[in-house]
Amino acid sequence: MTSPSFEYLLFETDENGIATITINRPDKLNALNAGVLGELKTAAGRVESDQDIRAVILTGAGEKAFVAGADIKELNKLNREEGEKLSAHGQAVFASFENCTKPVIAVVNGYALGGGAELAMACHVRIATENAVFGLPEVSLGLIPGYGGTQRLPALVGRSKAMELILTGGQLKADAALKAGLVSDVVPAGNGVAKAKELASKMLKNGPVALGKAIQAINAAPGYNGFAKEAQLFGELCETEDFREGTTAFLEKRKADFKGR
Ligand code: CO8
């Protein structure tokens, strides 16, 4: 089948109409720069409009990471207005997967940190490989999750666990993520896409219109409505010295020295 060409994504569709989108920036652990975000938006549009595509698998290239977060190099320069705008933009890109009327399965094949965990959470189902590591480490950079994580994580794992994870910036390995309800299954490394295809094939035995309406109905359940607040607060943090220090410390490969300003 035809595949659109991208710089940062691999996009393949198999004979059963299952598209696999692979974020392909392994030298930066598939971090989400502006180019990746833009291409994800285009890919989501393509999935929705292409009648031959019936389900989607989203994964990361290489053996180490699904996505290690937003590109911290790009974040480091943001001012308040740009921070809020970028946050809202990323939220909209992720929502285009969440609101897709065809099943979207994330195969989390390594680090899913920050924006990477948030992208996985926007998918309808998550399958982790045994080496998967989830975390929202934004507070360690003087930030908060800005791509929907403050909204979707509590809906998935409950407020207490979400508070613990977001406020500590701690990590969950695959088995703990399964226990917390963050993922549906854990499979050996290398088996994620095959497992996701098996799951997608079970879904695709059912009526496509019903699948789309089921997704819409589940997404309509009350759960989260603070996305604009998240973007606003993310923007406010972009004005702080702690944010500049946290992101600069990462880029300089040293520990952050926060002053609380
Ligand atoms: N951004 C930019 N570059 C990254 C990122 C990232 N998030 N993650 C990894 N890289 C780069 C590294 O800088 C390194 O590049 P180079 O080889 O040029 O030095 C390369 O990828 C490989 O990474 P490491 O050498 O660090 O690999 P390790 O195996 O030693 O460590 C880790 C792996 C633990 C995953 C480590 O890379 C790490 O801690 N990465 C950052 C994780 C993180 O903090 N993620 C959250 C980012 S903030 C975020 O996602 C906010 C989302 C909301 C945004 C809202 C927008 C406004």
Image (spheres, rainbow, N blue to C red):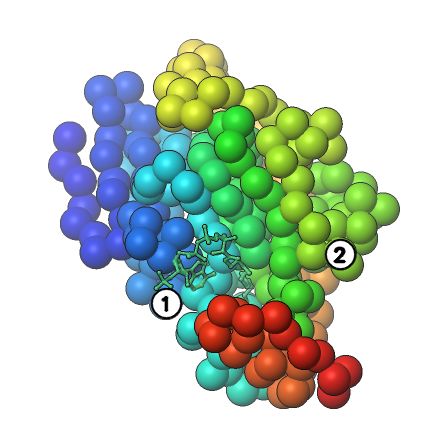
**Viewer-nearest residue: 103 or 235:** 235
> Which structural element holds mark 1?
helix
Give the quadrant of residue 245.
Answer: bottom right
Query: What numbered label is drawn on residue 168?
Result: 2
**Viewer-nearest residue: 189 or 194:** 189
Query: What numbered label is drawn on residue 118?
Result: none
At horizontal 47% and vertical 20% (from top left) the residue drawn is 188
Circle 1 sits on which residue? 34
Total number of numbered labels?
2
> Which structural element holds mark 2?
helix
Check mark 2 vs ligand 1: CB closer than 8 Å? yes or no. Answer: no
Check mark 1 vs ligand 1: CB closer than 8 Å? yes or no. Answer: no
Q: Position of residue 218 (x, y in %)?
A: 65, 35
Q: Earlier in the sequence, mark 2 or mark 1?
A: 1
Q: Is residue 20 left or right of residue 118?
A: left
Q: Is residue 205 left or right of residue 150?
A: left
Q: Quadrant of the C terminus?
A: bottom right
**Viewer-nearest residue: 158 or 164:** 164
At horizontal 17% and vertical 40% (from top left) the residue drawn is 3
Residue 79 vertical position relative to residue 201 in the rendered view, above or below:
below
The mark closer to the camera, 2 or 1, is 2
At horizontal 60% and vertical 43% (from top left) the residue drawn is 134
Does the image show residue 121? no
Q: Position of residue 249 (x, y in %)?
A: 55, 75
Residue 131 vertical position relative to residue 167 in the rendered view, above or below:
above
Residue 145 vertical position relative to residue 251 in the rendered view, above or below:
above
Amino acid tagged 2: Thr
Does the image show residue 251? yes
Compute the Cα span from label 2 to label 1.
27 Å
Q: Position of residue 127 (x, y in %)?
A: 52, 28
Q: Is residue 196 left or right of residue 233?
A: left
Residue 147 vertical position relative to residue 79 in the rendered view, above or below:
above
